[in-house]
Structure formats: C-alpha cells, structure tokens
Image (tube, rainbow, N blue to C red):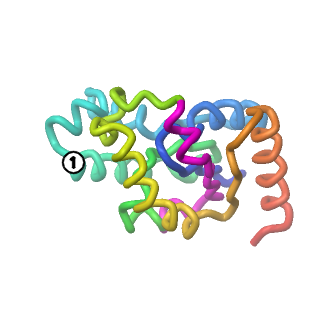
Amino acid sequence: MKKDVILIGMPGCGKTTLGERLAKELDIPFLDLDQAVEESAGITVSDIFAREGEAGFRGRETEAFSQNVGRGQVIATGGGIVTQEENYPIAKQGLVVFLDRPVTSIMEDIHTETRPLLQEGKDRLLRLHKERVSLYRKWADIIVCNQGNMEDVLKTIINEVKTYENYGN
C-alpha cells in the first residue's frame, strides 16, 4: 500500500485545491481533514471554534488525523496541525509535503472572514506564518514552493513524491 501524502502549510497555500488534483493524478483517495472533523462533530469548523475554542478544535483534529492516516490517500490538513506536537508522529507515518506559498500571495486572495483563526485579518495571517513556518519546515519530507502556474506546481509535487517514494527512506 502506498503511503499517505500529507499536505501541510498556511491557510490559503493550496492544500485542498492541489490535494484534490494530486489525488486524482496519483489515483488515490483525497481527504480534507477539516471536512472529516466537521462530519465527525456534526457541525462546522467555525461552530466548533465558537463553542469549544481552538483547544476543542485541535483535539478533534488530532483524533480525526489519527483515525484517517495509514489509508494510502492524500490528506489536506488544517494549517495549524503542526502546532500540536502529538500530530508529528502521526504525520510521519506518511510523506509530509509542505506547500510553501509566499504569505504575500496568500494575502492577495484569501478570504479571512471564512477562516476562524483569521478573523482578525491579514495581521493575524502574518503572525501565524511567523509562528508556524519553522514547524512546517521541520515536519516536511518535501518542500514545494507554490508560486506561479498551478499545473507546474502540481507536476513538481508529483515528481517530488514519486522520486521520494522510489529513492527515499
């Protein structure tokens, strides 16, 4: 069975968009971890944050992550998955790909009002990037810069994953 390909990175870096396409190209299932959390909870991520705070969401996220890893799929994680140390060994069961998109590019097209942790706007995005970028780099087996043409970025991810799969570990 193929390893999971686990996508990490900032909100708006392309995890879901590229993840869906990557899964199709690799002919494996795709899972959006936020959707898995919502399905399990029966409410939206925004509602979880409103009712249980970030800690409640993170607990649910870790539970969903541990239940879904190891199935040979592409998993688009939430941007804050790296803030919980207990998620690191779960992630390392798969191949971790950091989609490194410049924060200035994210700010150009992200809708902060639909993201619970970004309600404070673009300043919050900059603070989160500063807090998380070193964690993303630490966790990553592969780092792919998501800048420019999406087709080119997708090809780069596919080539990196296949190379790692054949020659890594």
Q: Can residue 32 be spotted in the picture?
A: yes
Name the residue tied to disc 1: 56
Percent coordinates x, y for residue 36 in the rendering: 41, 35
Residue 107 located within the stretch drawn in magenta: yes
Which residue is drawn at the image coordinates 28% and 35% (left, top)? Answer: 119
Looking at the rendered image, the quarter that the C terminus falls into is bottom right
The residue that appears at 49% across and 37% down in the rendered structure is: 107
The structure residue drawn at horizontal position 56% and vertical position 34%, both measured from the top left corner, is 16
Rendered residue at 79%/32% (across/down)? 151
Left-right relation of 104 to 111: right
Q: In this picture, which residue range is highlighted in magenta? A: 89-108
Where is residue 150 drawn, in percent x and y?
74, 33
* Residue 66 visible in the displayed image: no
Q: Is residue 32 above or below residue 133?
A: above
Label 1 amino acid? Gly
Residue 114 located left or right of residue 167? left
